[in-house]
Image (cartoon, rainbow, N blue to C red):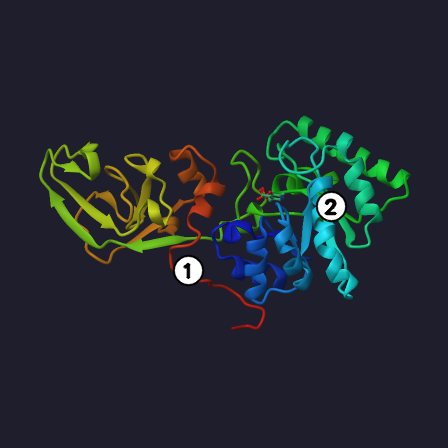
Amino acid sequence: MGVVKADGYGHGAVEAAQTLLAAGAFGLAVASVEEALFLREGGIRGFLLVMGYTPRETVADMIRQRISVALLDEDHGRELAEEARPWVEKGAPPLPVHLKVDTGMSRLGVLPQGAKGAVSLLGDSPYLHWEGTFTHLARADERDPGPTHEQLERFQQFLHGLRLKGLHPGMVHAANTGAALQFPGARLDAVRVGIGLYGYLPSPHLENPGLRPVMAVKSRLVQVKRLPPGTPVSYGGTYRTQEEEWVGVVPLGYAEGIPRLLSNRGHFLWQGQEVPIRGRVCMNLTILSLPREGKRGDEVVLLGQQGDEVLDAWDWARWADTISYEILTGFGGRLPRYHVGKREDGR
Ligand SMILES: Cc1ncc(COP(=O)(O)O)c(C=O)c1O
C-alpha cells in the first residue's frame, strides 16, 4: 500500500496515488476520510484504507465509495455497524474494516488484552466485513531491533489467538518504510510504505538502498542589493552585516513551508553553492547572503540539486530540529507543483 496521507507527504495526493498505482501498488492508505474522499473525487479507484478515525457520520460515504476503514475499539465498531446497517439492509455490501491493534505505539487501536469485544463484534456483525487486521510500529527506523521484534511478536500472538478461535483476520499488515527495509518478517500480506516512496529514509542513519528524493523545490531571486556594513536584516535585526554584503530575496517564507527555525541557520543553493539564510525567515520572504553580485531571476534551489551541490529534507530537518517528514509535508498546499517524469500513457 502506498501511503499518501498529508497530501501525499506534500507531493500532491492524487498525483502520488496515480503514480504509485501505475507502478504496481496494490492500494493506498490515508489518515482521514476527507483525504480518502479527496482521492475518490480525483478519480482514484481501487483499494483505499483510512488508517485513522472514521466518524460515524461518514459511514454512508465510505460504503458508497468502497473505502476501507480502521476499527479502533468496540464502541467505534458498534457505531460503524449501526450506521452501515440500513445500507446493508438495502442491499449494499458490508463496510470493509481493518481491525487496528495497538501493540506498542499507544496511539490508536485496541490493546491485545482488551480486544475481545471488538473481535466478537467484528466476527458476528453482518454489517461489517472483516477485511484486515493491522498494527503500527513505533521504532522500526531505529538501529536496535528489540522493540520492533517485541511489537511484531505481540501482533503474531494476537493473530494466532484469532486463528485458534477459528476467526479470520483477513489481510494482515504492520510494516512502514523502516520495517519494510529492515524487518523482512514484518512484510506479512502487505506493507504500508510512505516516506520511502518519496525517496527518503525514515531516519538518516539507516543504510540507503538507493532511494532518491522525488521532490525538488526551486524559486528565483526577486530582488538583489548591496547592504552597507552594520545593516540589520529582517524582523528583529537578528543578523547584522559585518562588511558590505550582497543579499538576495527569495519570495517564499514560513507560510510556504520554510520553517522559521531556518532563520540564521539554513542554506539554499545559488549558482551551485550553498548560501546562508540571513535574519529571520518571514511569512512569504527569505533573505540570502550572496558571495557576489546576483540578479533578479537567478534560480535558487531550496531542495534538490544545483551544479554539484545537493540539499535534501534531512539537511533541513537538522537545521530545524525536526524530521524529513515534517519538512516534506510542510510543502503541501500553497506552492505551485509540477509533476514531471514518465507516465504510463507515455505523455
Ligand atoms: C499507520 C501508518 N502506517 C504507515 C505509515 C507510513 O510510515 P512511513 O512514512 O514511515 O513509511 C504511517 C505514517 O506515519 C502510519 O501512520
Question: In this view of the protein, can residue 209 be seen by the observer?
Answer: yes
Q: Quadrant of residue 62?
A: bottom right
Q: Which residue is mark 1?
A: 337
> Which of the four quarters of the rendered structure image does ligand 1 lie in?
top right
Q: Residues within 10 Å of mark 2 (few under 14, many from 20)?
A: some
Q: 277 left or right of 200?
A: left
Residue pictured at 55% horizontal, 55% vertical: 34
Please identify the residue farthest to the left as the structure is shown: 228
Q: Amino acid at mark 1?
A: Arg
Separation of residues labelled 2 and 1 (CA atoms): 42 Å
Q: Which residue is mark 2?
A: 78
Q: Position of residue 214 (x, y in %)?
A: 49, 53
Q: Position of residue 254 (x, y in %)?
A: 33, 44
Secondary element type, mark 1: loop
Q: Position of residue 257 (x, y in %)?
A: 38, 47
Q: Amino acid at mark 2?
A: Arg
